[in-house]
Image (cartoon, helix red, strand yellow):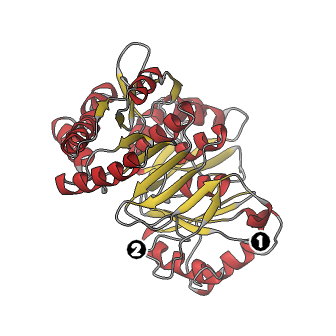
């Protein structure tokens, strides 16, 4: 007997017929004698619909109430999934994140898991039941519902797999696995059979929609090997695991695009120690994740600070910066949203030179201007105009020999 955690995303459970199909797939796994925990997302589009309803009432709804509202989507799915399994003769029980023992901090809409008490899930598994858990959500120490942000069901699945010491963790989505680029925009993209945690983390944090970056980080920390597969076929997917030596033979593993980026320029601030600290302390206190950062060379005691944040956080960022402008010299804040981030990722970059040169030359030959650049040991990211980023991705994919 194996213990298996299976996670199904919003597209996989998009309507009643798809929920029935997923239930049939779960039943196949149960019928082989396995203990199964199923983590599900809200049906595709439900979270967006609920968010739109809230914002039709108020432009800036309470984070606490948004958690209460958005958690409803997953709770609908767990009940429907359990009902479908009951109809097929499978004993199943639905759990909210709180009932599954997922305890978080108090940061609403972007909560982080603190501990998991999986004893209630263990009890149900021991009784021969399949447990259906609402992804994306937990409970804080005050008993309030919290959510993990977009893609949070991935995190729920990986965290439960770690807590339950599962033999397998399977992430089912609407694609066959992890590709060298988004096949919707790069037709030559190829499926990757296996990928390291670090590469997957960089791709996820750079805009790849296959996995939430925090879930990959959690998997690496707790040694959870997982496979990304399609819920619409039985093909093998992409295994995400610790790096092994042969992985470095591939210089660039994939290309990622993130169009959910905005550039914030804080201009005419004092060029002295502490100015940047004040700006980014304000961002941290507002719970805003800052990505790329560039500060120009100060002239006449004045400097400009440029950084990127998710587009949905621009309003919050501007509001937070209003309180620190006087402290940094009374600067000005400007927001530019027509940008996108293009990243190339690969553990082989640690031991191979020329990656940056090839990337910049390919973009230059296509007359695509680079606005910002950041690098890490296994990633190079650039900011370009949003209306040219798909073209840039195709050029880059070809330049690094990923088409074949």
The quadrant in which residue 152 appears is: top left
What residue occupies the far top of the structure in this picture? Answer: 142
What's the residue at 38%, 45% (across, down)?
30
Label drawn at residue 184: 2
SS at mark 1 in the image = helix
Judged left or right of residue 268, residue 212 is left
Q: For mark 1, what is the residue?
A: 249
Judged left or right of residue 31, residue 75 is left
131 vs 120: above or below: below
77 vs 122: above or below: below
180 vs 208: above or below: below
Label 1 packing within 10 angstroms: few (<14), some (14-19), many (20+): some
- Say which quadrant the C terminus sits in: bottom right
Residue 167 x %, y %: 56, 43
Answer yes or no: is residue 202 visible: no
For discs 2 and 1, the disc positioned in front in the rendered view: 1
- Structural distance between the alpha carbons of marks 2 and 1: 27 Å
Answer yes or no: is residue 203 visible: yes
What's the residue at 54%, 30% (across, down)?
163
Residue 343 x %, y %: 59, 65
SS at mark 2 in the image = loop
Judged left or right of residue 115, residue 349 is right
Label 2 packing within 10 angstroms: few (<14), some (14-19), many (20+): few
């Amino acid at each position: 007997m194996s213990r298996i955690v299976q996670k199904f995303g919003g597209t996989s459970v998009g309507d009643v017929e798809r929920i029935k199909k997923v239930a049939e797939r779960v039943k196949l796994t149960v019928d082989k004698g396995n203990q199964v925990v199923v983590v599900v997302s809200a049906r595709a589009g439900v979270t967006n619909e609920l968010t739109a309803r809230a914002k039709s009432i108020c432009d800036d709804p309470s984070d606490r109430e948004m958690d209460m509202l958005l958690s409803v989507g997953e709770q609908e799915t767990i009940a429907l999934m359990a009902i479908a399994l009951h109809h097929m003769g499978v004993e199943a029980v639905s759990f909210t994140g709180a009932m599954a023992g997922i305890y978080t901090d108090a940061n609403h809409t972007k909560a982080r898991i603190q501990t998991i008490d999986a004893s209630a899930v263990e009890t149900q598994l021991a009784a021969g039941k399949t447990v259906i858990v609402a992804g994306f959500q937990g409970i804080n120490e005050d008993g309030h519902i919290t959510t993990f942000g977009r893609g949070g069901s991935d995190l729920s699945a990986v965290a439960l797999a770690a807590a339950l010491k599962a033999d397998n963790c399977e992430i089912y989505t609407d694609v066959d696995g992890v590709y060298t680029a988004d096949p919707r925009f790069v037709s030559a993209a190829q499926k990757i059979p296996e990928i390291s945690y670090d590469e997957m983390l960089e791709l996820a944090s750079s805009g790849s929609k296959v996995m939430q970056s925090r879930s990959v980080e959690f998997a690496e920390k707790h040694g959870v090997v997982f496979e990304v597969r399609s819920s619409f076929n039985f093909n093998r997917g992409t295994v995400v695991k610790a790096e092994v030596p042969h992985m470095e033979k591939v210089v660039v593993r994939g290309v990622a695009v993130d169009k959910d980026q905005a550039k914030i320029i804080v201009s005419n601030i004092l060029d002295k120690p502490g100015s940047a600290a004040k700006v980014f302390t304000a961002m941290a206190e507002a719970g805003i994740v800052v990505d790329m950062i560039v500060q120009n060379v100060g002239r006449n005691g004045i400097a400009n600070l440029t950084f990127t944040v998710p587009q949905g956080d621009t309003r919050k960022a501007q509001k937070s910066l209003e309180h620190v402008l006087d402290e940094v010299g009374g600067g000005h804040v400007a927001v530019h949203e027509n940008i996108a981030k293009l990243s190339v990722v690969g553990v082989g970059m640690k031991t191979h030179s020329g990656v940056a040169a090839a990337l910049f030359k390919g973009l230059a030959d296509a007359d695509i201007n680079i606005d910002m650049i950041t690098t890490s040991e296994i990633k190079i990211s650039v900011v370009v105009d949003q209306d040219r980023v798909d073209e840039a991705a195709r050029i880059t994919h070809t330049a690094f020999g990923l088409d074949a």
